[in-house]
Image (cartoon, rainbow, N blue to C red):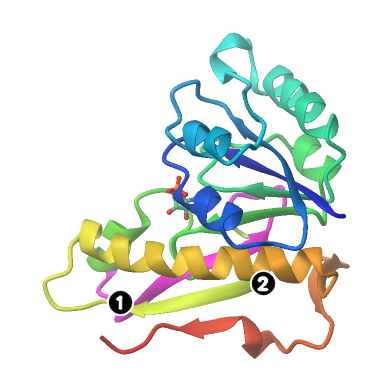
Amino acid sequence: MKKYVILISGRGSNMQALLQAGLPGQCAAVISNRPDAEGLDFARGQGVTAVVVDHKRFPDRESFDGALMVEIDRHAPDLVLLAGFMRILTPGFVRHYEGRLLNIHPSLLPAFPGLSTHAAAIDAGVCIHGATVHFVTPDLDVGPALIQAAVPVLPGDDAATLGARVLQQEHVIYPAAARWFLEGRVGLEGGRVRMDGLAPADGALLSPTP
Ligand code: GRF
């Protein structure tokens, strides 16, 4: 059976969606860089090994990423899922997991990389916002997309209401992307997403009109 590891830093609602999705694989571990991440308790409650590699105990990014890699590789995962993991990763880390490292970002990339994406979308006056699951490449938030969900920006929205609408869709598309990967239906080849029996449009999820 394929194995996956989930990295979190906080709430862990995407991790929860992944663990409850009945994925065709075993979650070998949930790893947090913060000892107080709320998601750790949920993982333990599901009988999943949940461990902390506290970034504050390391002098620099390289040594933290090195320790994190040791902890991840202990489980020999086929797939590593970043689920609200709030650390910039070193190129060495990204290369090590190239082709088996996915992230979820709360915007329709390449629009609004980085933080505060919902406020940025409202400030920009866009009509459509959303979320993207993408392969991780050394540059922040620019890797090839596997699946995207679009949601409308509604009159009166603020970052919180828009973010909640996006998060609902994140919980749909991240398990879907993880399932495709674990089933061997998608992969990364020559910097592009390979899809077997899937068309790019299969990764375009439009939320129902409210
Ligand atoms: C999500 O919005 C995700 O897209 C972003 O960080 C947030 C994490 O939320 N990368 P949660 O911890 O999964 O609830």
Whether residue 35 sits left or right of residue 143 in the image: it is left
Relative to 190, residue 138 above or below: above
Tell me if residue 136 is in the magenta stretch: yes
Is any atom of residue 21 visible in this view? yes
Whether residue 86 sits left or right of residue 53 in the image: it is left
Tell me which residue sits at (41%, 48%) in the image: 115
Where's the N terminus, which quadrant?
bottom right
Q: Which residues are magenta?
A: 124-140
Tell me which residue sits at (32%, 68%) in the image: 165
Q: Residues within 10 Å of mark 2 (few under 14, many from 20)?
A: many
The x, y position of residue 48, in whole percent, is 65, 37
> Which label sits in the foreground, 2 or 1?
2
Where's the C terminus, which quadrant?
bottom left
Q: Earlier in the sequence, mark 2 or mark 1?
A: 1
* Observer-nearest of 92 and 209: 209
Tell me if residue 33 is in the magenta stretch: no
Q: Are marks 2 and 1 in contact (CB under 8 Å)?
A: no
Whether residue 109 sits left or right of residue 165 in the image: it is right
Q: CA distance from mark 2 to mark 1?
A: 22 Å
User: Which residue lies under the disc numbered 1?
Assistant: 126
User: Which residue lies under the disc numbered 2?
Assistant: 146
Relative to 17, residue 82 above or below: above
Relative to 152, residue 169 above or below: above
Tell me which residue sits at (59%, 56%) in the image: 18
Q: Residues within 10 Å of mark 1 (few under 14, many from 20)?
A: few
The image's mark for residue 4 is: none
For residue 185, which quarter of the picture?
A: bottom right
